[in-house]
Image (tube, helix red, strand yellow):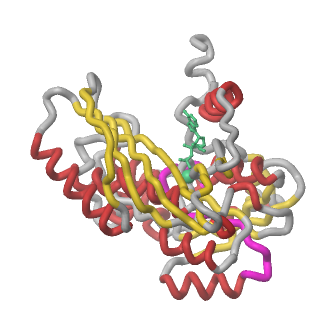
Amino acid sequence: MKEREIIDLLASLAPGKHSDLLVGIGDDCAVIRKNADQSWLVTMDTLIEGVHFDLTWHAAELLGRKTVAVNVSDIAAMGGRPLFVFLSLGLPAEFDPQWLTEFSRGFAAACSEFGCLLAGGDTVRSPNGIMLTLTVLGEAESGRVLLRSGARAGDVLWVSGKLGRAAAGLELCRLGMIGESGLQDLVQAHLDPRPRLELGRRVAQEGLAHAMMDLSDGLATDIAHMCLRSGVGIVLDAGKLPVSDTLREAARQLGLDPLHWMVAGGEDFELAFAAAPDRKGELLALGRDLGVPLTAVGNFDTRKGVRLLRSGQDGTGPVQEDISFAGFDHFPAGDNAKKI
Ligand code: ADP
Ligand code: MG
């Protein structure tokens, strides 16, 4: 079973229906009615030692920051404000108190930077490494919440920042190239991601998009979710995907195609949103205002799937390849096929 099949199974056997549950399983956050005008936004993400981080290269303080950042990113994806966080901390019996102090320092700094408060949690012993689960409670005006399900055929897909940087940074860490001069911004993107809170707020407040999400599992998988939820498909233009010079340089040094990181690499925590074509001017002005590059990378249509348009090799014409769900999956097909 793949990750989304597991979630679908749970959702089908334990459906959540309540008149105040405006959006349940399937979006970046659950949306719960708070009062006549506002909604609560609730999200949870887990970081596991050996899966999401490696202590040999991830400094405790930065891991504390990242625990908050990756969760707050899901609030940004709805156009909301984070308010309260709850931390479940699994620690090995022999944990280092100095490590915990530094982790807590980074955690507190990120909470203060993003405007949220630690309001509770749980502390348990873990037999196998550190486990960090955070729940974030945020809020937004109900009429302004941006879901994954609102994209329309004819809309343009925009992404913030540059793609594939965190995945490239992780690869550099794995290869022992963490100190490689000139490639530091990629390593930083993996160690210390920055959620696009201000951008998410402004896009939602100004009604500039029909749908929005954050990019955590790679464009191919994340946009496939947006397409499925919206009942549309998309053509992504490979030539338009925003690539940084350092990503190109890292790919050159490793003999890899940078496109792979940009399409399938996880943990960018950039925002992706679907907007009507006539919003282009306002969006470019907003990007300039915030100092965040915004790039139009594809067009939604009525066909199925996420199709990547690339210029053909050896002078042949452009080719389209279906890349739906080609990003990160915690349970890629086959791993558990015999067990479940
Ligand atoms: P994101 O990458 O934005 O954090 P996920 O891919 O983790 O989103 O989850 C997709 C959706 O599935 C979310 O709405 C999330 O709440 C829900 N979900 C994931 N795992 C579970 C689970 N074990 N039980 C119930 N809902 C889940
Ligand atoms: Mg998300």
| Up-down relation of residue 291 to residue 189 (above or below) | below
The quadrant where residue 200 appears: bottom right
Residue 200 shown left or right of residue 247 in the figure: right
Residue 168 falls inside the magenta stretch: no
Estimate the x, y position of residue 319 in percent, counting from the top left.
80, 55
Find the magenta span and give its range: 263-279
**Residue closest to the far right:** 302
| Up-down relation of residue 89 to residue 2 (above or below) | below
Q: Which corner quadrant holds the N terminus? A: top right
Residue 265 falls inside the magenta stretch: yes
Q: Residue at x 43, y 54 (%)?
A: 70
Q: Which corner quadrant holds the C terminus? A: top right
Estimate the x, y position of residue 258 in percent, counting from the top left.
54, 57
* Residue 249 appears anywhere in the view: no
Q: Residue at x 59, y 49 (%)?
A: 30
The quadrant where residue 50 appears: top left
Q: Quadrant of ligand 1?
A: top right
Camera-side residue of 112 and 121: 121
**Residue closest to the far top:** 338
